[in-house]
Amino acid sequence: MDKSTMKKLFRSAAVCTLSATMLFAGSCGRPEQKREKIAVITKQDISFWADVESGAKDAGKELGFDIIYNVATSDNDYASQIEFINNAIKDDVDAIVIAPNSSDTELNEAFAKAEAAGIKLININSRANYDGIISCVSSSDLDGGSVAARHSATSVLGADDLRAVFSSSAENKPTLEAVQEYGKGAIAILGHTAQTANDRIKGYKSECIEQILTQMAADGLSVDNGGKQLTEEQKEAMFQPFFIECNRCSTIDASYEEAKKILTGADGKNIRTFYATNTNTTLGVCKAVEELGLSDKVFVVGFNSDEQEINYLRNRVLDGLVVQNPYSIGYVGVSYAKKALDGQRLPKSLDTGVTFVSSDNLNDDYVQLLLHPDTY
């Protein structure tokens, strides 16, 4: 199959994703009328959002909409987004598709003004805490964290080393204590400042703990809880010593400084993996790991598909990326806005999925299309 055909299929996948969710959607009988403008507002100027922009503009072109595209300065800059929403109201747009930089209430006053003006509100990437949001198109942050944990588990836990710890533990030393001692400080986590980081970290930690328990069970070892199943709270408390949670960072430079401080500090001597939750934190961690010569010791897993991240992946500084589908997020977001304007029912949310990218599958056709939807 040639690249041209593959690219057509890739774009068709976004359309099919949209169509599948709308199979049973009804129309309210609203007469057709031309809608001219949709405002698309995103979080920051990095390649992930450039791909979202491409998907949104392609959908706008196909559906006959002008797309007004605005991008904030960072993933916690909601002041600019409020200004963009107010400008969209003045521009008399028909819908706003926005990746909100706040899931709390900072944007709600602007959202209320837009809704009062008859503007349809669609979220992409993350959901705002506002009742008037019709639908949210995004990947699952919990699932993204879980995927990162599943693919890094062996490097995180060092399966052979862990079994050696089990077999060499003194008979009078509890197995759990031996595991906790072995794994203390093994996993460093550097989250970004936006709300999406919370679920990405929660999903990662939860799945890492499940991997620890699964590995213990495979070796015939279990945690004695009086015959009762461990609660999630008990699991988290039991294996909390494994995790080092860094200060949240919003920029590459701040992430680099934080990662370097952790890796060279007293708590960093046992780090086996470093998990970063977005592009800027991933690039900061990679810069620190490369500079300190720790590429062979520390397994780095991050998020998104910036070209600098791909270069770190090729150079084996970065071991894996959880890649969302930004093109589809933009495409379906605008398509949902059109359907909302046509009076069709929409699901409250749509999960566009994630793909784990490593050196093993980096050159696969689908992965290359995912990374470079406009040029491959």
Image (tube, rainbow, N blue to C red):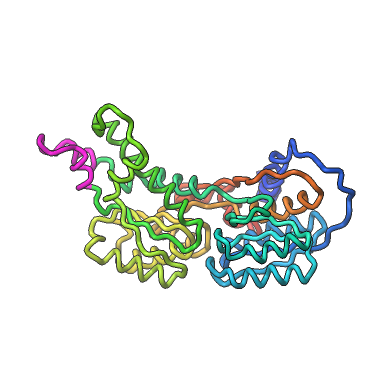
Residue in view at x 20 percent, y 47 percent? 181
Q: Nearer the viewer, residue 154 or 144?
A: 144
Residue 37: percent from the left, percent from the top?
Answer: 79, 63
Q: Nearer the viewer, residue 81 or 10?
A: 81
Q: Is residue 195 above or below residue 153?
A: below
Magenta includes 174? yes
Relative side of 87 to 161, left or right? right
Residue in view at x 42 percent, y 49 percent? 202
Which portion, as a residue range, is magenta? Answer: 162-182
Residue 2: percent from the left, percent from the top?
Answer: 66, 47
Q: Is residue 307 above or below residue 185?
A: below
Magenta includes 314? no
Relative side of 89 to 255, left or right? right
Q: Which image quadrant: the N terminus? A: top right
Going by the picture, which residue comes out furthest to the top?
227
Residue 57: percent from the left, percent from the top?
Answer: 73, 60
Relative side of 355 to 135, left or right? left
Q: Nearer the viewer, residue 249 or 263?
A: 249
Residue in view at x 25 percent, y 34 percent? 223
Q: Is residue 164 above or below residue 199?
A: above
